Image (tube, rainbow, N blue to C red):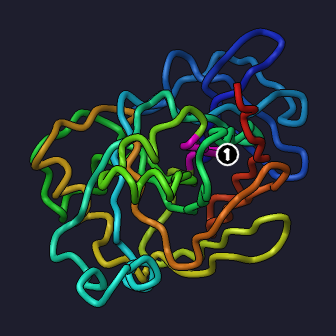
Amino acid sequence: MRLGRIASPDGVAFVAIEGDRTAVAREIAEHPFGTPTFTGRQWPLADVRLLAPILATKVVCVGKNYAAHVAEMAADARTKTVPDDPVIFMKPNTAIVGPNAQIVLPADANPVHYEGELAAVIGRPCKDVSAARAAENILGYTIANDVTARDQQRKDGQWTRAKGYDTFCPVGPWIATDLDPADLEIRTKVNGELRQHSRTSMMVHDIGAIVEWISSVMTLLPGDLILTGTPEGVGPIEDGDVVSVTIEGIGTLTNPVVRKAKS
């Protein structure tokens, strides 16, 4: 099943998206967790606007989870070491935007990088989950772009400001619930040019290990997003660019880029 969130002439709703060329969005009553029930209302997908597919209370991200990306970002030999445990950080939920929404670059940030990633969506409250039982607590998977002001990340020595701007967490276009995340192709293009090309099987820490690690620290709630790290090939985006992240079995998340004018 594909679960999404839309803006229609009747308001905002969670939906199940069915079909391909003539896809329709069937309205879900209340929320998409558990076994969804439907109101009976539906719209052609072409007649509604896709929003970020979930309202997360928090966005937990994993850094340095692809060895080749660790290597490309290393300042020297000492920083090329792949971490034994997942490295986690957080983005505010105010950074989330949906497909086709603008990524707004701060006027004083340069360069700002794209980072295409697989994101897991938590399906029920959980704490201290074992890796073996992680899948039981996941609603499904979607696509995310962990946009990063790279100069501010280096200057600050930590990642909150650089990754926390409004619009710096595009998510979508929907959540795929029947998906094995172990070995999915992931591609990022900027203006149609391929920049990232890898597979989720190249992760240092897999989904189970990530959920176990994060849930040992904090309680995860329905709708929480876990960004699982980006492969090699990150690079800058500029005013006027269009960045698209495609993950096998899910679809494509596309966002235009604009730069905020200096005040």
Q: Where the C terminus falls, by quadrant?
A: top right
Image coordinates of residue 28 in percent, x first then y, are: 60, 23
Of the residues shown, which amino acid type is indicated by label 1? Pro
Q: Which residue is found at the position 74% from the left and 21% from the top? A: 7
Determine the image quadrant of residue 217: top left
The answer to whether 169 is drawn above or below residue 147 in the figure is: above
Badge 1 marks a residue whose secondary structure is strand
The residue wearing badge 1 is 173
Q: Nearer the viewer, residue 221 or 171?
A: 171
- Left or right? Give the position of 248 relative to 135: right
Residue 172 falls inside the magenta stretch: yes
Q: Is residue 3 above or below residue 211?
A: above
Residue 171: in magenta span? yes
Residue at position x 46%, y 54% in the image: 119
Nearer to me, 93 or 183: 93
Tell me which residue sits at (75%, 51%) in the image.
Answer: 254
Classify 20 as above or below 95.
below
Please indicate whether residue 154 sits to the left or right of residue 117 in the image: left
Name the magenta segment's main secondary structure.
Answer: strand
Q: Looking at the picture, how far across and down is residue 90, in whole percent?
A: 33, 43
Give the side of residue 46 with respect to residue 182, left or right.
Answer: right
The range drawn in magenta is 168-175
Please provide percent x and percent y for residue 12.
Answer: 67, 16
In the rendered image, the residue lying farthest to the top is 10
